[in-house]
Amino acid sequence: MKYLLSLAAAASVLAATPALAQQKLLPAQSEIVFVSKQMGVPVEGRFKKFDARVAFDPKKPESANIAFTVDLGSASLGAPETEAEVVKPLWFNVAKFPQASFQSSSVKALGAGKYEVAGKLNIKGNARDLVVPVTLAQSGGTTSAAGAFTIKRLDFKIGEGEWADTSMVANDVQVKFKLALTGVGAL
């Protein structure tokens, strides 16, 4: 259950990648990981399917547009019984809400390849404002966008009913992401 919350957070992070000319996401070189604590023990999961539409000009970051979607049913927690549980209504409710999404509203350059991406994260029909720190680095024709942020799972109704007890599954879920993009101009 904790894993599900973490996955939702991870989706948010990926959605927060900077974007002007259209870039292409390289899924095989990208990842979204989430970490939650279950009874005080860190539990890591990842989303296997996600997509991003990124338009980012390093010379005009304020004009960036970033949209991200995460297939909540692709949550991988390393345990089939947990993965079967997280798609149910008390967790992600994938039948009704198959995707989490993020849409940027602004991108602010902080210098030295660091940015703040603000926008709305939507999970299970619950939208919240989010600011995500993102660091860009380039190697060859690939730009990597990496960062981490924390969400409160209960803000998104992840882990309802008996699972709302934060002594069993912590409310904080850390989302870490690394996105590989092509088509980004020189930083």
Image: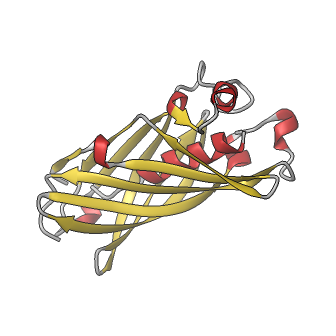
Q: Could you tell me residue 132's position as x and y percent?
A: 47, 62
Residue in view at x 64 percent, y 39 percent: 4
In-image side of 153 versus 76 (left or right):
right
Q: Looking at the image, how many numbered discs can be counted on the residues? A: 0
Position of residue 1 in the picture relative to residue 27 (left or right): right
Q: Nearer the viewer, residue 108 or 180?
A: 180
Colour scheme of the rendered structure: secondary structure
Question: For this view, does 108 lie left or right of residue 149?
Answer: left
Q: Position of residue 27 (x, y in %)?
A: 30, 41
- Which residue in the rendered view is the most extreme toward the bottom? 112
Q: Is residue 38 left or right of residue 130?
A: right
Quadrant in which the N terminus is drawn: top right
Q: Position of residue 187 (x, y in %)?
A: 17, 71
Residue drawn at 87 percent across, 36 percent down: 162
Q: Residue at x 71, y 44 (%)?
A: 2
Q: Is residue 23 visible?
A: yes
- Residue drawn at x 59%, y 24% as measured from the top left: 94
Q: Nearer the viewer, residue 22 or 90?
A: 90
Position in image of residue 35 (x %, y %):
61, 54
Decide if residue 15 is in sight here.
Answer: no
In this rendering, is residue 138 above or below 68? below
